[in-house]
Every structure is written in structure tokens, then in C-alpha cells.
Image (cartoon, rainbow, N blue to C red):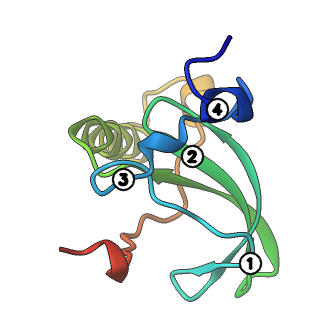
Amino acid sequence: MPDSELDFLVPEYAEDPARYVVGGLHPILIGEVLHQRYKIMHKLGHGSCSTVWLARDQSQSTYVAIKICEASPEASKDKSTHDNLSRLRDQDSTLSLDWKLLSIALEQFFHTWPEWNT
């Protein structure tokens, strides 16, 4: 028997809805446009401190994956790791071909939800 009715309604493959709080995950709506450019089309998945969404880049007419990190110290570590990997990949010509094929974000931006600001 589930602990609550909500536990029963949330599939195992979905993130916990209780994580959608100030300082946690941010709610995203299908059709929402982020950064005046990326139209959210479909949820691709979630991880320990982020969700990933399929979006249409309206300026390039291509599809992209958008990773939205929660507002937490763990997410800050993720950004720091990304920055370091990007720097290594772009600056070190001695890296093996496998390392240079590492997928790094095309762009980073911050998005605020006014209704969540306190």
C-alpha cells in the first residue's frame, strides 16, 4: 500500500513532485519559450538534480535538449564541472579524439520564474 495517494499516482520513472519548490526543481510547461528562443516540446527525462526537455530552437529551426538544473549547491557543482570540461576540450590540443567528441552544451543561460522570487 502506498504511503499516500500521491505516491500511488506518480509513476516510478517520474521525479518526486515534492521537489518542485523554491530552491528545487522548476516547473516547465509544454509550449513554454525559454530565453526567447527555445520552445519546450516534450520531457525527455530527469536526474538527481535536473530535468531534461526536448525544445525547438526557433532561431535555428533545429531541435535541442535543454537541461534545467535545480537551484541547489549540487546543481552549482554540475555547472562548474561543465565549465571545466568545456575549457579542457577547447584548449588542449593533445587530447585524444575520443575526448574531443565529448558533448558540451552549446549555450548556458539563467532563467528566473518571477512568481517564485521572494
Q: Earlier in the sequence, mark 1 or mark 2?
A: 1
The C terminus - image quarter? bottom left
Horizontal arrangement in the rendering, residue 93 relative to residue 116 (left or right)? right
CA gap, disc 3 and disc 1? 21 Å
Residue at 54 percent across and 27 percent down: it is: 99
Asked whether disc 1 touches disc 2, contact meaning CB atoms under 8 Å apart, the reply is: no
Q: Earlier in the sequence, mark 1 or mark 4?
A: 4
Which residue is labeled 1 in the image?
Answer: 31
Residue at 42 percent across and 47 percent down: it is: 90
Disc 4 crowd rating (10 Å Cα; few below 14, some 14-19, many 20+) is few
Which residue is labeled 2 in the image?
Answer: 51
Q: Is residue 22 above or below residue 83?
A: below
In depth, the one of 11 and 35 nearer the eye is: 11
Which residue is labeled 4 in the image?
Answer: 5
Q: Secondary structure at mark 3?
A: loop
Q: Nearer the viewer, mark 2 or mark 4?
A: 4
Q: Earlier in the sequence, mark 3 or mark 4?
A: 4
Q: Amino acid at mark 3?
A: Val
Q: Is residue 86 above or below residue 107?
A: above
Q: Secondary structure at mark 4?
A: helix
The N terminus - image quarter? top right
Which residue is labeled 3 in the image?
Answer: 21
Q: Amino acid at mark 4?
A: Glu
CA gap, disc 2 and disc 3? 14 Å
- Residue 65: % across, % down: 68, 55
Q: Nearer the viewer, mark 1 or mark 4?
A: 4
In depth, the one of 91 and 77 nearer the eye is: 77
CA gap, disc 1 and disc 2? 16 Å
Q: Earlier in the sequence, mark 2 or mark 4?
A: 4
Question: Quadrant location of residue 38?
Answer: bottom right
Q: Secondary structure at mark 1?
A: loop
